[in-house]
Image (cartoon, helix red, strand yellow):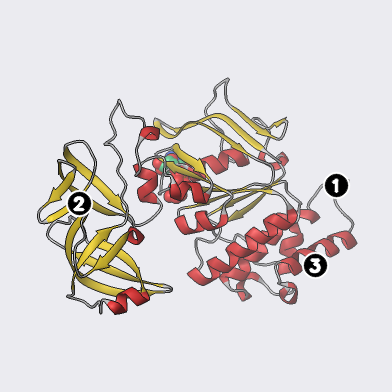
Amino acid sequence: MSIRLEHIEKHFGRSQALSPTDLDIANGELIGLLGPSGSGKTTLLRIIAGLETPDANPRTRILFGERDVTRVHVRDRRIGFVFQHYALFRHMSVFDNVAFGLTVLPRRERPSSGEIRTRVLRLLEMVQLSHLANRYPAQLSGGQQQRVSLARALALKPEVLLLDEPFGALDAKVRQELRRWLRHLHDELGFTSVFVTHDQEEALELSDRVVVMSNGRIEQIDTPEALYRSPANRFVFEFLGDVNLLEGEVRDGVLTCGDAQLKADLPEGRQELLLRPHEIELATTPDESSHLPATVTAVVPVGAEVRVELSADWMNEPWLASVRHEQASQLTLARGSRVYARALTWHHYPAPSASVQPSLAASY
Ligand SMILES: Nc1ncnc2c1ncn2[C@@H]1O[C@H](COP(=O)(O)OP(=O)(O)OP(=O)(O)O)[C@@H](O)[C@H]1O
């Protein structure tokens, strides 16, 4: 089921939660709505669901496939929901929770009890909870409860599955596992999914395309790879990962800040550069394009890499470099080590002004 949103705007009283927004979601896509708190993600999701009404405007339309559902009640939109807080019925077993939506269907749509049983058992098998069918929600872990929520949402064979921070209340390992679940079920059952998250990693890992939002606006819609490679503006760049800032005066193609210098072919005057932690190399000497002396303040091994925190008078905030383990041990990095950061690459976005559109921002 494809979804098309045209001119969706929403005010709560006088405050605007969503600027007029258009969005096209293809049949079978898994879309992540990503943005900081208050950026309008949940409002957009609730409008797709029919739980919230967009501002009245003749141009506003919500289409599910060819069907105009702008004024269709939530109950008739054929949507499955999963929310952050499991909202399972506490007095019902896992089996009955999953079966619930089917058992309350009007008689002529309701499958026979045999069919309901088969469908529920199949769903429990898919989320690998068959052995817990007779348990009650309070007897399950958070991750298991959320799997029951998923199975329950899928019982009615929705064409659209909407998830609001579905894994938000769970710990990192369980979140990781549930992401795989969701991706797997989504691909196997072929529905269209939209989920809300403020977790960049989750959005990038799970989505076919990510919709990045801020202040009630869509900043960029792209595949995770394209988003990370070519952020449309500085907001997206900063929101998608750790960033180190270097602010200084550019003269004759060199940016200077205290005793830091970096070759930068930019207009003369005050400029700010951004570098990701993996775009910095550490060395015992400067190189011809950068002179960025710093002191190591922390060395933290994280998985396949080592995160090194750096400080220097020329930095406003400490920098973070991620280096390979071999490099860290070659340089015998420890707190207090003196090193030179080398910029492998950097990014620059012109300061926003009325004359500069975000899409024109340059990234080198
Ligand atoms: N029912 C409401 N009444 C008044 N204002 C609301 C209501 N719901 C949302 N808002 C406001 O609309 C804006 C967008 O909220 P929304 O919940 O969509 O953001 P969000 O990106 O989902 O944030 P979070 O990640 O914190 O849930 C916020 O400024 C919020 O305070």
According to the image, label 3 marks what residue? 121
Residue 47: percent from left, percent from top: 57, 38
First-in-chain label (2 vs 1): 1
Residue at the image point whose x is 21% and y is 71% from the top = 297
Q: Residue furthest left?
A: 258
Residue at the image point whose x is 52% and y is 43% from the top = 222
According to the image, label 1 marks what residue? 109
- 115 relative position to 328: left or right: right
Q: Nearer the viewer, mark 1 or mark 3?
A: 3
According to the image, label 2 marks what residue? 262
Let me know if residue 89 appears in the view: no
Determine whether label 3 and label 2 are within 8 Å by CB.
Answer: no
Q: Residue furthest top?
A: 58
Q: Is residue 143 above or below residue 27?
A: below
Amino acid bearing label 2: Leu
Quarter of the image with the C terminus in it: top left
- 339 relative position to 242: left or right: left
Residue at the image point whose x is 56% and y is 42% from the top = 46
Let me know if residue 275 appears in the view: yes
Q: Nearer the viewer, mark 2 or mark 1?
A: 2
Q: CA distance from mark 2 to mark 1?
A: 69 Å
Of residues 23 and 278, the one drawn nearer to the viewer in this rendering: 278
- Looking at mark 2, is its residue's CB closer than 8 Å to ligand 1? no
- 250 relative position to 140: left or right: left
Quarter of the image with the N terminus in it: top right
Amino acid bearing label 1: Glu
Of residues 175 and 75, the one drawn nearer to the viewer in this rendering: 175
Q: Nearer the viewer, mark 3 or mark 2?
A: 2
Q: Residues within 10 Å of mark 2 (few under 14, many from 20)?
A: many
Amino acid bearing label 3: Leu
